[in-house]
Image: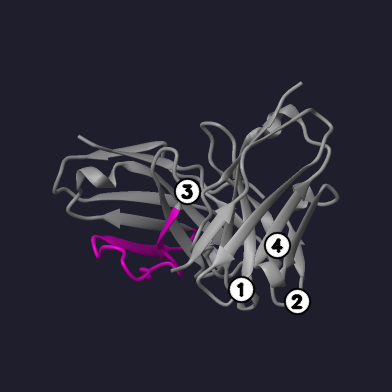
């Protein structure tokens, strides 16, 4: 069965960077992409962007451009999302989700989420 | 890209039908048939319930159905059950080649 397992919770200071991993299993990793979505406490879902596991192409939401990097490592079927220059209002649960081909398609299987706390 | 607009809350009694709206613009909901709906229980990851406006993934109950008219998409839950109590989010592809989510709707089963 399709599974996405994310790395554990992180606590970071403002201005620091965080790198979240997402290890996939149960499907052909290279045939899909991985999208990243975050959810602040008590708030809604926010699209951050996606990365193709086929060719590494990325497309980031405008507000994250310049601060986020999404990558994949095919041998370990793992995707990564690094967010730099963290602000305290970016405390949130960060989700990865499988995405076929591109954002016209809906993310279907989701990871369990990684809580990132940004606090001094 | 602004979030799509959903009602904050919708409620219904067991067995009833409810409908959740999702209003966007011609640059997202109205421009493409790429609307999805997600169910999220507290502390859990979202679950895909509807994709491409009307399609249900395998394993999703046929009590869930989707539709779209103009810039507004809708999710209908028929035969409401206690387990349907959750937050629901719509999502649409946009003209910026990205996706946008709705503001979210809390469904309460009375």
Give the position of the C terminus of chain A as an image quadrant: top right
Q: Secondary structure at mark 1?
A: helix
**Marks 1 & 4 on one chain:** no
Q: Residue tagged by mark 3?
A: B45
Contact (CB < 8 A) between labels 4 and 3?
Answer: no
**Marks 2 & 1 on one chain:** yes
Q: Residue tagged by mark 1?
A: A29
Asked which quadrant contains residue B106, the reply is top left
The residue positioned 55% from the left and 70% from the top of the image is A105
Instruction: From the image, state whether disc 1 or disc 3 is nearer to you.
Output: 1
Position of residue A106 relative to residue A5, above or below, is: below
Q: Residue tagged by mark 4?
A: B96
Q: Secondary structure at mark 3?
A: loop
Q: Secondary structure at mark 4?
A: loop
Instruction: From the image, state whether disc 2 or disc 4 is nearer to you.
Output: 2
Contact (CB < 8 A) between labels 1 and 4?
Answer: no
- Neighbours of disc 4 within 10 Å: few (<14), some (14-19), many (20+): few
Rounded to the nearest angstrom, the CA distance separating label 1 from label 3 is: 20 Å
Residue A36 magenta? no
Q: Residue tagged by mark 2?
A: A55
């Amino acid at each position: 069965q399709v599974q996405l397992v994310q790395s554990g919770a992180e606590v970071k200071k403002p201005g620091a960077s965080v790198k979240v991993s997402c290890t996939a299993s149960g499907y052909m990793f290279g045939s899909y992409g991985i999208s990243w979505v975050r959810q602040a406490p008590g708030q809604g879902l926010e699209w951050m962007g996606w990365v193709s596991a086929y060719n590494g192409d990325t497309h980031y939401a405008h507000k994250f451009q310049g601060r986020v990097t999404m990558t994949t490592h095919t041998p370990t079927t793992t995707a990564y999302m690094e967010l730099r220059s963290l602000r305290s209002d970016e405390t949130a649960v960060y989700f990865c989700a499988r995405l076929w081909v591109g954002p016209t398609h809906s993310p279907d299987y989701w990871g369990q989420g990684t809580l990132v706390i940004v606090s001094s | 890209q602004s979030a799509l607009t959903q009602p904050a809350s919708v409620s219904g009694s067991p067995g009833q039908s409810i409908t959740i709206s999702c209003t966007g613009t011609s640059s997202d909901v109205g421009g493409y048939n790429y609307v999805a709906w997600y169910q999220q229980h507290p502390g859990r990851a979202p679950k895909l319930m509807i994709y491409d406006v009307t399609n249900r993934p395998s394993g999703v109950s046929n009590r869930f159905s989707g539709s779209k008219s103009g810039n507004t998409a809708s999710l209908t839950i028929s035969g409401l059950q206690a387990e349907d109590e959750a937050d629901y989010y719509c999502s649409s592809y946009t003209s910026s080649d990205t996706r946008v989510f709705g503001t979210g709707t809390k469904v309460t089963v009375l």
